[in-house]
Image: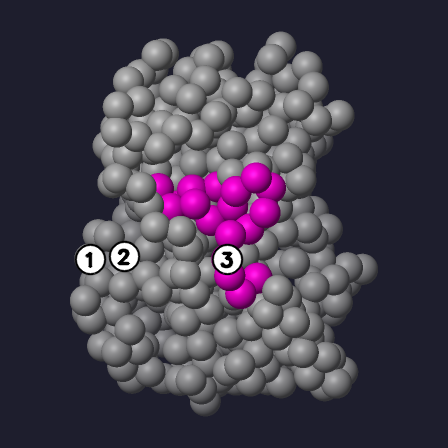
């Protein structure tokens, strides 16, 4: 059940004559290439494909690429945009999680998740890992899931506990939410469930064990913030000692972790989500993008918080590239960060068999970028490089999720996009009154 009020997917859709940028096994660009979609799945990629029985979309003057995957974002904070632009991590925690989060009503969470997910889609992010640590009450979780579903985005909903509200950590709420909202979830559901607990850096190991057991009982993946301390100075080693390292855990940030702990993550089959813009801005530690690559970690990119940084992947691609230039170690190139934003993110979320590239058989999560614009003209020289170096959300012409059109001719198709903005504005005013 997606519940998404988006256009129905045509049985056959042919994207005709685009510049197709694929990202796996490496970044390639093919001019004048068609993409055929059947029942929401990529059926063929090639030149001169038959349009028989298909709706045809003219993709000339467009770059066609896989939808972006944001592997770490607190979507509920979309109603708190730019409240912490000049804050370091400590100030952000005190203001946003300490004072504003408790003021969020379920309707504010719904408004934040709907408008935040629409912002993702508007900029070509077709999949988001929503680390949703605003569940002060069970109703907040329901509202968050409904907001994602209403947007029509593909999402991994990470049920999280508010860090400064210990009473809200109630595993029964997670079990109950799964029963009610994810009972029938199958491979075609756009929104799936994960657990996003405090983790070993911030929670006593006894509670960590309970959380890991809950995820195992529910057969759902985990996502956790990690760093050296304040609870465990070596959190990954702490997990290893308890037998809790597993391949279904996504570790977020980790700038302060030493290489040997990052190697433990790699050995376990777990993955890393880095948020280069926010880590640099808030002072999480030295950029780690080069270390992650050197250690062979499956790595995706995350916006993290729009309280302090932009919510689009183009900005993040640039941040990733710049921090790589500044960090120790072997630098990355444009193609590397483009892979992190697509197939790398998909792999980090355990979804690489379904999304992240344009392979036949994958879900048709696609983005079409205009190249007949003042900032993209000339992109034919290096289309992938232009995506990383020059593009912005205003170039996003068309976005498909599982073959459904969620943005067309530069406009979101969601019928309630205006109301979503109005509701988010009301929520922002309500929460701001708590300052
Ligand atoms: Zn975060």
**Residue nearest the observer in this picture, 323 or 209:** 323
Q: Which residue is mark 2?
A: 189
For label 2, the SS is: loop
Q: Nearer the viewer, mark 3 or mark 2?
A: 3
Residue depicted at x 57% and y 21%: 61
Residue 431 colored in magenta in the image: no
Of the pair 205 and 117, the residue shown nearer to us: 117
Residue behind mark 1: 186
In magenta, the rendered stretch is 399-417
Quarter that holds the C terminus? bottom right
The answer to whether residue 204 is above or below residue 265 is below
Q: At which x and y percent is residue 96? A: 66, 73
Image: 185 above or below 122: below
Pointer 3 residue: 414
- The answer to whether the residues at label 1 and label 2 have Cβ atoms under 8 Å apart is yes
Question: Is residue 408 part of the magenta span, yes or no?
Answer: yes
Mark 1 → mark 3, Cα distance in angstroms: 24 Å
Q: Locate residue 370: give its quadrant.
A: top right
Farthest bottom residue in view: 167
Residue depicted at x 61% and y 64%: 418
Residue 314, position as x, y percentages in the image: 63, 38
Quarter of the image that includes the N terminus: bottom left
């Amino acid at each position: 059940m997606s519940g998404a009020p988006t256009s129905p997917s045509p049985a056959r859709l042919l994207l005709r004559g685009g510049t197709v940028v694929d990202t796996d096994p490496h970044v390639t660009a093919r001019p004048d290439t068609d993409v055929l979609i059947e029942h929401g799945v990529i059926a063929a990629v090639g030149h001169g494909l038959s349009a028989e029985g298909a709706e045809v979309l003219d993709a000339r003057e467009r770059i066609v690429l896989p939808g972006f995957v944001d592997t770490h974002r607190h979507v509920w904070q979309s109603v708190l945009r730019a409240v912490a632009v000049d804050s370091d991590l400590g100030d952000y925690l005190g203001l946003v999680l300490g004072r504003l989060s408790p003021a969020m009503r379920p309707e504010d969470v719904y408004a934040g998740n709907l408008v935040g997910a629409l912002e993702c889609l508007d900029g070509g992010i077709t999949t988001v890992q929503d680390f949703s640590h605003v569940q002060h009450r069970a109703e907040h979780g329901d509202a968050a899931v409904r907001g994602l579903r209403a947007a029509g985005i593909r999402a991994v909903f990470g049920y999280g506990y508010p860090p400064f509200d210990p009473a809200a950590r109630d595993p029964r709420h997670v079990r109950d939410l799964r029963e009610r909202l994810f009972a029938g979830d199958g491979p075609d559901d756009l929104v799936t469930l994960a657990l996003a607990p405090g983790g070993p850096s911030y929670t006593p190991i006894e509670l960590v064990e309970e959380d890991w057991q809950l995820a195992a009982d529910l057969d759902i993946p985990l996502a956790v913030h990690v760093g050296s301390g304040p609870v465990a100075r070596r959190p990954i080693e702490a997990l290893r000692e308890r037998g809790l390292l597993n391949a279904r855990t996504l570790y977020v940030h980790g700038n302060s972790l030493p290489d040997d702990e990052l190697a433990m993550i790699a050995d376990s089959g777990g993955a890393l989500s880095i948020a280069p813009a926010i880590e640099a801005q808030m002072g999480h530690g030295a950029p780690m993008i080069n270390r992650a690559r050197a250690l062979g970690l499956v790595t995706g990119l995350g916006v993290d918080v729009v309280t302090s940084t932009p919510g689009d992947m183009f900005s993040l691609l640039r941040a990733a590239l710049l921090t790589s230039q500044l960090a120790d170690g072997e630098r990355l190139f444009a193609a590397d960060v483009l892979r992190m934003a697509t197939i790398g993110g998909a792999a980090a979320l355990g979804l690489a068999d379904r999304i992240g590239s344009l392979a036949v058989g994958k879900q048709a999560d696609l983005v079409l970028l205009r190249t007949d614009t003042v900032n993209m003209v000339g992109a034919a020289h290096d289309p992938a490089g232009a995506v990383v170096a020059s593009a912005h959300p205003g170039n996003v012409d068309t976005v498909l999720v599982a073959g459904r059109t969620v943005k067309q001719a530069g406009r979101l198709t969601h019928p309630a996009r205006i109301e979503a903005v109005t509701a988010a504005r009301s929520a922002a005013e309500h929460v701001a009154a708590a300052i």
